[in-house]
Image (cartoon, grey):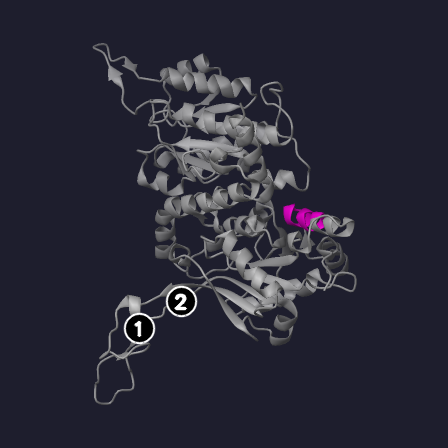
Amino acid sequence: MSTDLSQATAAGASATGPVRDGRGASGERAAASDRRAATGGGSSREVATALAIIPARGGSQGLPGKNVARVGGVPLVARAVHAALAAERIARVVVTTDDAEIAEVARAAGAEVVERPADLAGATASSESALVHAIEVLSGPDAPAPAVTVFIQATSPFIDPADLDAATTRVEAGDRDVVFAATPTHGFLWRERADDADGASAVGVNHDPSDRPRRQDREPEFLETGAFYVLRTDGFARARHRFFGRVGIQSVHPDTAVEIDDAADLARARILAPRIDRRLAGSLASAQAARVGAGAGIAWPADPRHPFVDVDAVVTDFDGVHTDDTAGLDELGRESVRVSRADGAGVARLRDAGIPVLILSAEANPVVSRRAEKLGVDCVQGLADKGSALREWAAARGIRLDRVAYLGNDRGDIPALDLVGWPIAVPDAAPDALERARHVLQRHGGHGAVRELAELVLAARDARAAAEGRSAASDPDWRGERDAHDAAREARAFDPAHPTRLQREAIAAASGEASAP
């Protein structure tokens, strides 16, 4: 099996035409691995070779638009891509889809895209058929298929890259032909017998109802989560099924066992996301600290209060964000609001760093104009649809929406929150707004919330600059120019629960510099 995965895209594209955007972050990472191998750099264990494939069709019947539904502010297919990119053993990440929106989200997250034929994207088509097609497209005479294929399902929003690495290592080592994600359970299972002529009661499936040993006295059984399956590629090519040969289990945390099939599953995942993402982020940062010896010096993303909000613009609501959502009224009917000087200082720092700031307000009120004028930022008022206004403002300035942080607090902010890469909410925001937030601030509106967001944005920018040997303070026009086909995608695809290797290195570098005497 060849490890020259960077050539597979070119070979597949020239042969069949359906591969698009083959120069994404994963393609560049594969090429980098090959360069290390060719030059003798690093051990063989350090060279990532596995191919991750994420099937994501557009025609979900149970939950329309399921694969781009947001959990923790991030589309499901993007979360799967982020997890794969963060795994050390995966060299290349590909999404196979028939849907243009899914393809766009996948590319923005850093994946390559294979166009999935319509006859392999219907409700009865198997995931295996999509895998076989993608492997065939990506392989050729000059680019044989990789030894290991990692099949990841976008409907599982909570995948720990460490689990992907552990499972992939077992297959690479020849310990197993297949390793799949499962969570341990000590539950007693029952089944009702529909064929009982005498009307007998339900029967125990995995236990004798007359013998109920204590939990600690029973060996666990395992529930398949559906999150991922690591396959020896040649064995899968023969079997055309995900289970063949010697099958092993990768035990994963019960929190990650959520699989989204319907609206109730999606709602539950959104509720769980803040806690689970924090745990995943902390686990990753701890592992990175152990690798680089940075110890407690790493401030992100182990500390959930300080996510790595790497963006090019900040947009906010006004009432409930710059204010505490109350208003004063004098005897002449004149309205006044209370704002925070700390917020003003934070906005000033954003301006000094060259980061555009916009205030969007549903209500047309002179006090909003006065505050925006005082802060020296753009302002649009009297809006029925904040999403459209935000889209127009960003397009006029050449700013991608996935590189925007939006801070809101109410239902009227939802169209804007759903557009941006970093939807953020104040802690007392409306439930619908909190549900869409990728991060919830600690400070309330009118009490330093905008300042808190500004500090996160500036800290992320300084970390990126430090990793590149530059200083944002000495170069206020710094926009984080990056390599067009690697760091650019890594930057805009950042997920606090699934930072990629380059992102973790940037975090470690910045933290080490900050803690130096």
Mark 2 or 1 closer to N-term?
Answer: 1
Q: Main secondary structure of the magenta part?
A: helix
Which residue occupies 35% across, 52% down?
268
How much space separates mark 2 and mark 1, taking CA atoms? Answer: 11 Å
Q: Position of residue 290 (x, y in %)?
A: 52, 43
Q: Position of residue 228 (x, y in %)?
A: 51, 61
- Place residue 426 in its image quadrant: top left
Residue 398 seen anywhere in this rendered image of the structure = no
User: Which of the numbered marks, if any, corresponds to residue 189?
Assistant: 1
Figure check: 78 above or below 168: above
Q: In the depicted view, which residue is nearer to us: 29 or 516?
A: 516
Task: Using residue 159 as the reference point, say whether residue 269 is left or right of it.
Answer: left
Label 2 is placed on what type of residue? Answer: Leu
Q: Residues within 10 Å of mark 2 (few under 14, many from 20)?
A: some
User: Which residue sits furthest top?
Assistant: 332
> What is the magenta range?
23-32
**Quick one: SS at disc 2?**
strand
Label 1 is placed on what type of residue? Answer: Leu
Q: In the depicted view, which residue is nearer to us: 363 or 126?
A: 126
Magenta includes 132? Answer: no
